[in-house]
Image (cartoon, helix red, strand yellow):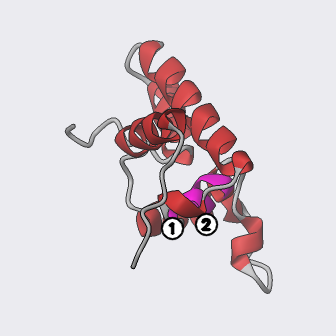
Amino acid sequence: MVREQRLDPEVELIWEDFHAEVNVPSEQLRQWLLTRGSGEEAFGANPDLDLPEPGRRILRVLSKRKVDLTPDDVEVMREAVDRIRALTADRPARGAADDKWRHALLDLGHDVLVER
């Protein structure tokens, strides 16, 4: 007999919000972060170690099942949702600042060019 594990409703809600806001597939996010983390230098022996934060933490959460979340994971999801929503609410005028803004969102796993 398999017993269904019940999650805190708040965790369920943040899980849904997180997956709605983080709209870049994990492999695409990983590739973006590797590009961002490489800068002018070649990758080190383990390129995953060079991934910028908080993207690395977001990737870790994306690889988990809901039932495997830790309190730290829930906090990562909450912070990502808050940061993405704050950034999307404060879109700059077109131009160089627009690229910087979009890159900041991509670092969090959100692509403004993806239809919801």
Q: Amino acid at mark 2?
A: Leu
Q: Are marks 1 and 2 in contact (CB under 8 Å)?
A: yes
Q: Residue at x 45, y 26 (%)?
A: 98
At horizontal 58% and vertical 27% (from top left) the residue drawn is 83
Q: Residue at x 59, y 63 (%)?
A: 68
Q: Quadrant of residue 52?
A: bottom right
Give the left or right position of residue 75, taking residue 9 as reference: right
What kind of residue is marked 1? Gln
Q: Where on the picture, by quarter, is residue 28?
A: bottom left
How packed mark 1 is, by other alpha carbons closer than 10 Å (few <14, some 14-19, many 20 or more), is few
Where does the image place residue 82, in percent across and percent down from the top left? 56, 25
- Identify which residue, 68 or 80, lies in the foreground: 68
Q: Residue at x 51, y 22 (%)?
A: 87
- The residue nearer to you, when weighing 3 against 7, is 3
Q: Secondary structure at mark 2?
A: helix
Position of residue 91 measured from the top left corner of the image (x, y, whole percent): 43, 16
Q: Is residue 14 left or right of residue 77?
A: left
Q: Let me know if residue 75 is in the magenta part.
A: no
Marks counted in the figure total 2
Residue 22: percent from left, percent from top? 43, 45
Q: Which quadrant is home to the C terminus?
A: top left
Q: Main secondary structure of the magenta part?
A: helix
The residue tagged 2 is: 34
* Cα–Cα span, label 1 and label 2: 5 Å
- Magenta segment, which residues? 57-62
Q: In the current view of this chain or complex, which residue is farthest to the left?
A: 115
Residue 88 in view in this figure: yes
Residue 31: mark: 1
